[in-house]
Image (cartoon, helix red, strand yellow):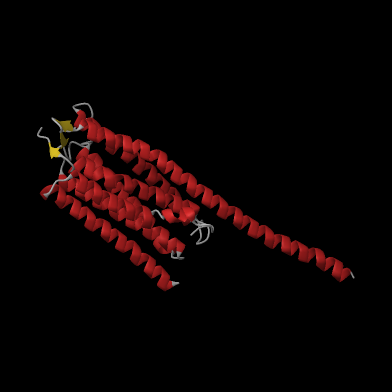
Amino acid sequence: MNGKRTAAYRLSVSVALFLAVMTGIEYFVAIDFPSTVVLLLLGLFKAVAVVNYFMHISRLWRQEGSH
Amino acid sequence: MSAVTSAAPVAHHGHDAAHGADHHEDNYAVAWRHNRLGLWLFFLSEAFLFGGLLATRFYLWQENGVTMRPPLNQVVGLVVTVVLLISSLSMNLAETGLEHGDRKMFMRGLVVTAILGLIFLFGVMIFEWGLFPSIHETELSPSKDVYGAVVFAMTGMHAIHVISGLVFIVLIWNLGRKGHFSQERHWGVEACAIYWHYVDLVWIFFYPAIYLIGKATHH
């Protein structure tokens, strides 16, 4: 149980770190290489991570009750 | 004989009770799935609202075919974005904590999320809206030009969702404090967490649209 919990917390922190790195990249892309397409693509990658790992969209297709 | 006749109804009743409990759990599971689908459909409808605001931004913020943006403070934009991002992490840790029986993490995560949400909200109100000129003055105004109008519309609509998310968090925290929610039954917590992440999701697209994309105008 504790191992599962630790793994779940680790995943949360990993996703947040990914989002932080992507935000930093966005910031520097906007300053050094301003491209609307690149910035929107970076935003899209972040959105996929949030929808998948934080909002648990896959639970919509699960048959059992909660998670 | 009487033992047989009296035991039979008891056994029958016991079976009914167990069956009733199972049925109750099934109902909860079914309701949970339906609620989850309903919430996602609500998000879909909200996406049209926020998508409309984004389309407005790209349509109006142009000069001679060049995409423009208002001269906002980049550091403020980055800081409030990071604060909202960390609040998403704390909310996820709260939800994950409850799912794994860690009530302390659940309750602390909610408190941290609410505090970070308030910091984000006041950051926008003070540094972008200039609601407290004694602290910070801004050139933006909702009625001055299209830049101010769109910034206030986008951040205003987003702020309304942050406020409703904060109210949601306080309600869930209060119920959690009273012992509500368990590992098996916590639809309210999941809904609150998903809603908060949706607020973050919207900002993921609003941040580059407001602060990063386009050439800064000079006022």
The answer to whether residue B149 is left or right of residue B3 is left
Q: From where the camera sits, is residue B17 visible?
A: yes
Establish if B168 lies above or below B2. Answer: above
Q: Is residue B15 left or right of residue B38?
A: right
Quarter of the figure that contains the N terminus of chain B? bottom right
Q: In x, y percent, where is residue A37? A: 21, 45
Viewer-closest of B5 and A57? A57
Q: Nearer the viewer, residue A39 or B102?
A: A39
* Residue shown at 38% from the left, 66% from the top: A8
| Quarter of the image where one finds residue B97 | bottom left
Identify the residue at horizontal 56%, vertical 50% (top origin).
B31
Residue in the image at 84% along x and 66% along y = B6
Where is residue B113 shown, x and y percent of the image? 34, 53
Quadrant location, the C terminus of chain B: top left
Residue A48 in the image, given as x and y percentages of width and height: 33, 53
Whether residue B138 is visible, yes or no, is no
Q: Position of residue B21 (x, y in %)?
A: 65, 59
Q: Is residue B181 above or below residue B50?
A: below
Residue extending furthest toward the right: B1
Total of numbered circles in the picture? Answer: 0
Image quadrant assignment for residue A13: bottom left
**Left or right: A59 as drawn, with respect to B163:** right
- Measuring 37% from the left and 60% from the top, which residue is drawn there? B93
